[in-house]
Image (spheres, helix red, strand yellow):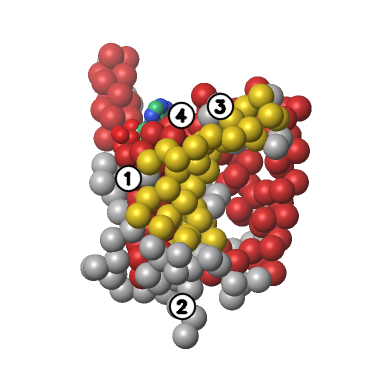
Amino acid sequence: MRGQTASNQRVQVTARKLAEPDPRRCPRHMKLNFTSPCDQKAGVLASLLKRSYANLVESDPEHWGPEMPKWEEFDREVLANPETIGNCVFLSWSGNQLVGLGSYDPRQRPAIGIVGHNCVLPEFRGQGLGRQQIQEVLRRFRAIRIRKAKVTTNAHPFFRPAQRMYISCGFRETGRRPWEGDPSQDMIEYDMELDNNTPEPIGTNAPQPQR
Ligand SMILES: CC(C)(COP(=O)(O)OP(=O)(O)OC[C@H]1O[C@@H](n2cnc3c(N)ncnc32)[C@H](O)[C@@H]1OP(=O)(O)O)[C@@H](O)C(=O)NCCC(=O)NCCS
């Protein structure tokens, strides 16, 4: 700009940068929206999982590389079965930004519901979004009167946030067993009794209880 000093211009550029919201920061306590994955293109779920586990796969490709085809298979199965598996998976959105996914297996209802794949993209972590996803799974379990939620994660340090997240959501550790992908790594099992006295409304994606 004519007549403006270089330092003035720098101040203006810095001020503009500060004013622009960082797209990776979701406002604290931003409520996520959950939608069905079945109206998305094939590959969205596998891509979320690959991006979420990229550091782990890179650090130990021998043991974690073989998980990648399973994520692609999961993606295919969800899209091929929108009324069953597809109904038990959700995409998580902060505004119009896709940030992660959650899933669960209610087939042992009403005794048990199992928390399945869940992840938040690395750039959106540490803002309470993973916790919201687990709470959404638990809300759906309560809506169909599931009495106990179970989840399993790995003891590898990569999964410390997940371990912390489950404890913080109310799960308690019940046992450990060797992981079949590498028996030197343990799987940690958790469960949680659900209070069904205050049922919440069944969401659009929640599976209907069998009559
Ligand atoms: C696990 C995961 C979903 C957590 O997502 P997130 O949005 O970062 O989690 P939140 O911000 O809701 O935090 C949940 C808890 O984990 C803790 N946490 C988050 N990041 C952490 C970190 N890097 N180290 C230690 N604890 C951490 C938080 O403090 C919080 O606990 P608190 O409520 O006691 O404070 C995310 O790290 C992820 O996608 N990891 C890879 C995939 C994965 O492990 N999925 C679970 C498979 S079993």
Q: Quadrant of the N terminus?
A: top left
Identify which residue, 139 or 58, lies in the foreground.
139
What amino acid does circle 3 point to? Answer: His
Mark with earlier residue (1, 3): 3
Label 2 vs label 1, nearer the camera: 1
Which of these two is toward me, 80 or 181? Answer: 181
Is there any visible trace of residue 38 in the rendered image?
no
Report the front residue among 113 and 119: 113
Across the whole image, how many numbered discs are drawn on residues?
A: 4
* Residue drawn 40% across the image and 72% down it: 144
Whether the residue carrying mark 4 lies under 8 Å from ligand 1 is answered with: yes
The kind of residue on which mark 4 rests is Arg
Q: Amino acid at mark 2?
A: Gln
In the picture shown, does residue 109 fall above or below 190? below
Q: Earlier in the sequence, mark 2 or mark 4?
A: 4
Q: CA distance from mark 3 to mark 2?
A: 36 Å
The dot on residue 160 is 4
Residue 61 point in image, percent of width and height: 73, 28
Q: Are marks 4 and 3 in contact (CB under 8 Å)?
A: no
Q: Is residue 189 visible?
A: yes
Residue 99 pos. (x, y %)? 46, 47
* Residue 208 disc label: 2
Rendered-image quarter of ligand 1: top left
Q: Is mark 3 within 8 Å of ligand 1?
A: no
Tag 3 residue: 156
Residue 194 vs 56, above or below: the answer is: below
The amino acid at mark 1 is Gly
Q: Dot 3: what SS?
A: loop
